[in-house]
Image: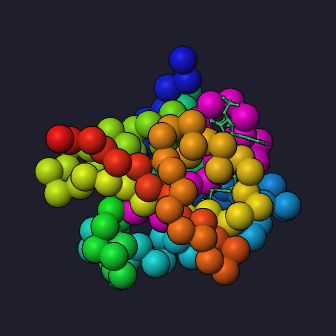
Amino acid sequence: MTEVFLKPISADNWQECIGLKVKDEQADFVPSNLYSIAEAQFYPQAAPLAIYNEQDQMVGFVMYGVDVESGKWKIFRLMIDRAQQGKGYGRAAMEQVIEQLHARPDCNEILIAYQVENDAARRLYASLGFTEVTASDGKVTARLDLDKG
Ligand SMILES: CC(C)(COP(=O)(O)OP(=O)(O)OC[C@H]1O[C@@H](n2cnc3c(N)ncnc32)[C@H](O)[C@@H]1OP(=O)(O)O)[C@@H](O)C(=O)NCCC(=O)NCCS
């Protein structure tokens, strides 16, 4: 099974993180990591995390936090570097984020949004149990119920 390690973005790794890039045809699916790391500075609950593989190589970036509009926990970003896609890293990172959020007493559900045409994201999230709840302006929002009883 593919294993990944999530580490906070820090003074030591942010520059490497902004060098990660998605494929050209995926550019509209996610803002640059530079943009996301800048944005995170203004949201105290945002957790911007670098994704590392078992060889301690940085392979991606993920960021979650509380959605200002709904007050719910949301995964704002997920990207795997273009050279590292298709190796199970995206799934493994999502599983860890879900685990981290599950451990929070104030989190009973997780939201995530993606573009309608983003098949890879849709399939990945659906396979993890997310169900689509709303769609507007070409964007779908899906929700995972953490079933805490
Ligand atoms: C979406 C993304 C994070 C998936 O990461 P990844 O490491 O390549 O994905 P994995 O190897 O873990 O694959 C997990 C699942 O994603 C789906 N998937 C991944 N690549 C896919 C592709 N090219 N076409 C269709 N489905 C795909 C599959 O369901 C796959 O499950 P499977 O291996 O059982 O078939 C990656 O493609 C990416 O960074 N895309 C650009 C940014 C983006 O769209 N982010 C999401 C914004 S909401």
Task: Tell me the quarter of the image containing the C terminus.
Answer: top left
Indicate left or right for 143 with 90 as reference: left
Residue drawn at 41 percent across, 73 percent down: 40
Residue drawn at 48 percent across, 77 percent down: 38
Indicate left or right for 29 with 63 as reference: right
Indicate left or right for 109 with 57 as reference: left
Q: Nearer the viewer, residue 101 or 123?
A: 123
Residue 87 on the magenta segment:
yes
Q: Seen from this angle, which residue lies furthest left?
A: 105
* Res. 112 visible in picture: no
Ligand 1's quadrant: top right
| Location of residue 60 with respect to 141 vertically, above or below | above
Q: Nearer the viewer, residue 104 or 44?
A: 104
* Res. 99 visible in picture: yes
| Location of residue 105 with respect to 147 vertically, above or below | below
Residue 50 locus on image (x, y percent): 48, 50
Q: What's drawn in magenta, residue-wise?
A: 74-90
Residue 16 locus on image (x, y percent): 58, 55
Residue 122 locus on image (x, y percent): 65, 50
Residue 145 locus on image (x, y percent): 34, 48
